[in-house]
Amino acid sequence: MSYTKEDLKQFKEREIKVSEIDRQLTNFQKGFGFINLIEPATIGNGISRIEPEQEERLTGNYEQACRKSDVLKMVPASGSATRMFKDLYHFMDTYHGTVGEFLEFVQVKEPGSMHDFFLKLDELPFYMHLSAAMWHNGKDISKMVEKREFNEILKYILGKKGLNYGNTPKGLVDFHIYRDFVRTAFDEHLVEGALYCHNGKTANLHFTVSEEYMNLFKTRLKKVTKVFEKMFNIKYNVTFSIQKPCTDTVSIDTDGNILRDETGKIVFRPGGHGALIYNLNELKADIIFIKNIDNVIPDRSKGDTVKYKKLLAGTLLDIQQKVFGYLEILDKKPTEEQLKEIETFLPAIGYREAEGKTFSDRKERIKHLQTILNRPIRVCGMVKNEGEPGGGPFWVKAQDGSARLQIAESAQINLKDKDQKKVFDQATHFNPVDLVCGVRNYKGKKFDLEKFIDPEQGFITDKSYKGQNIKVQELPGLWNGAMGNWNTIFVEVPLTTFTPVKTVFDLFRFEHRNVIKK
């Protein structure tokens, strides 16, 4: 395809190669194939369970290792809070204060209703700041509730004259109330860092944020750093990065043409969270924890979170030790017994050999084992599936007949195929995004993570742009195709470690509630 001078200028500004745009357009034409599920990963078949007698050893291994290793926590935090408040926006658009609307409003009282929202308004963690913002403008929030001025209150929550949560990153929304402090999700991740992601002196954290919100995060960091450093007797090393413009993708209209704006410029869209593999690739650490920005909990309940982060990291170190030892054996002259032992070990790192696999000679067999073993390793916490949305753990068949443990989303699976849907529905666990990553090889050299992306696991979805239907493309997801060729270990973790805030109503859930006596 030919491009205009303006197109080439846009590509240069984003540091995108023309070949990459061509590849994206080819993807639109041929589409992405579905992955081939073999069976769900279950306890004893792809998911391990840490027994009580293992806990002390695994925790001790990690605590000892982190004193001499570089450990870091990466938190994807670029998301806006807009989705979190979508029900509030809907209410503002549809509620006009008529008698009929009010009668309907008061009749729907169950949790998650707008009636329940206003009834419990003073229990929200941002109530104090909301009340202060309104008081500053001569507004009494209690009287406004009495007068049924609901939309005006919501404007103060979402708009610029108040908290401006409609244009705030989710990480900077007030989440939890403490006796003398209200913490944001960002704050809670800093606290977690001091509890399990440090070398005894320094806690290292990295947040991926939107460029427009970078200064807001830095301002908040400056405000809370000294408080937490004094509280935990530790120093913080906090860094930020933005999603790289070179990972943006183009869209197409219904005629298959590149989507352009009214001036003729190509419309680019962020490539999805899979773009963060490039941010991850630039981080310098031995062990990297990954956890979403909204999955946090108050201090009173952090025990399981801290415990299992250390256990997952201890499991990673256990697996690394075995893998590194086997690779050193393969570098020498392994015996037949050693080769068989290594082959028997492969399912423990999420790999099953293709049935009937043969090798032309011993040298090829050794090289094959080296290729399988010498990869980045991720240990992923998995929680029991109790109806929460999200991807799940599966054994997935590759084109060469081998199988790997993968985290699969519904969009990657042909659910119209009865057999595939049956396997998908049989999943016992789902992915809470609770990863610990080992990104160095057995010689201490950092892996180039771009080499382990499965480019065939991208997504194409239907969206709209200024009233017209379009197709958009996302890169393989960070914990899906972006890590598609990593070695993978799934470990069951308790549901208490998964407490996301997807909507504002989640802040009313017990695990996030204010338990301070008034």
Image (spheres, rainbow, N blue to C red):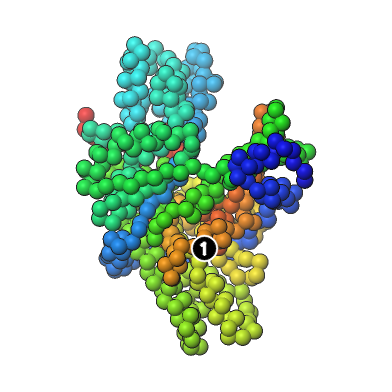
Residue 48 image position (x, y, % from top left): 42, 65
Residue 69 image position (x, y, % from top left): 33, 61
Crowding at dot 1, Cα within 10 Å, few <14 / some 14-19 / many 20+, comes out as: many
Up/down of 286 relative to 144, above or below: below
Asked where in the image residue 229 lies, by quadrant, the reply is: top left
- In this picture, residue 370 sits left or right of residue 24: left
Circle 1 SS class: loop
The amino acid pointed to by label 1 is Trp
In depth, the one of 477 and 262 nearer the eye is: 262
Does the rendering let one see residue 59?
no
Residue 479 image position (x, y, % from top left): 51, 54
Q: Which residue is mark 1?
A: 486
Up/down of 12 relative to 98, above or below: below
Residue at image point 50% right, 66% down = 375
In depth, the one of 224 and 518 nearer the eye is: 224
In depth, the one of 386 and 382 nearer the eye is: 382
In depth, the one of 330 and 423 nearer the eye is: 330
Residue at image point 69% right, 41% down = 8
Does the rendering let one see residue 236?
yes
Asked where in the image residue 481 lies, by quadrant, the reply is: bottom right
Quadrant housing the N terminus: top right
Residue 161 image position (x, y, % from top left): 42, 18
Up/down of 368 relative to 315, above or below: below
Residue at image point 39% right, 60% down = 286
Quadrant housing the C terminus: top left
- In this picture, residue 91 sits left or right of residue 414: left
Residue at image point 41% right, 56% down = 284
